[in-house]
Image (cartoon, rainbow, N blue to C red):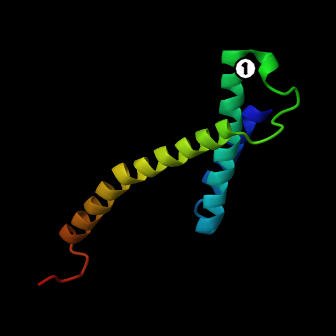
Amino acid sequence: MPGTSPPAIGSLWLYLASEWHYLVNLSLYVIYGVFFTILAVTSHRVIIRGAESVPAYGLKRWSHREFGFFGWILAVYLVYLMVWMLPATVMFAITANLAGSGTEYS
């Protein structure tokens, strides 16, 4: 069941992306990150330390491992924004200027 939650939230985000406000989309990203963090940390604990290393009925508390993993998710996303959004913004400005957007520069 936990494995189906992130894809369901991702599908909901795609459906609502053009319909809802930016803050709602941002909150869906955060919820997705929380579900992914719990799923990733739990599955790695089971694989590395065995099934007895995780609680039988889910996460009992949010530990330093979850905080660390969620922090890495945020760091990777910020690097992604810097690497892809800055060149995309520059290219958009160049193509808008070449297409004659109506703005005259002197």
User: 40 or 32, which lies in front?
Assistant: 40
Residue 101 is drawn in which quadrant? bottom left
Relative to residue 75, is residue 59 drawn left or right? Answer: right
Residue 65 lies in what quarter of the image? top right
Identity of the residue drawn at 27% across and 62% down? 90
Q: Relative to 72, is 1 above or below?
A: above
Secondary structure at badge 1 equals helix
Q: Residue at x 65, y 31 (%)?
A: 40
Q: Nearer the viewer, residue 62 or 22?
A: 62
Q: Which quarter shows the N terminus?
A: top right
Report crowding for label 1: few under 14, some 14 to 19, many 20 or more residues within 10 A (C-alpha).
Answer: some
Q: Is residue 103 above or below residue 22?
A: below
Q: Residue furthest front?
A: 64
Nearer to the camera, 102 or 86? 86
Q: Position of residue 106 (x, y in %)?
A: 11, 84
Pinpoint residue 8: horizontal percent, then vertical percent: 71, 43
In this view, which residue lies farthest toward the right?
A: 57
Q: Which residue is mark 1?
A: 46
Q: Percent from the top left, x then y, of residue 2?
A: 77, 34
Q: How many marks?
A: 1
Front residue of 2/77: it is: 77
* 95 displayed left or right of 86: left
Amino acid type, label 1: Val
Q: Residue at x 73, y 32 (%)?
A: 3
| Residue at the far left in the pictured view | 106
The quadrant in which residue 57 appears is: top right
User: Could you say where residue 45 lies in the image, as x and y percent from the top left?
Assistant: 70, 23
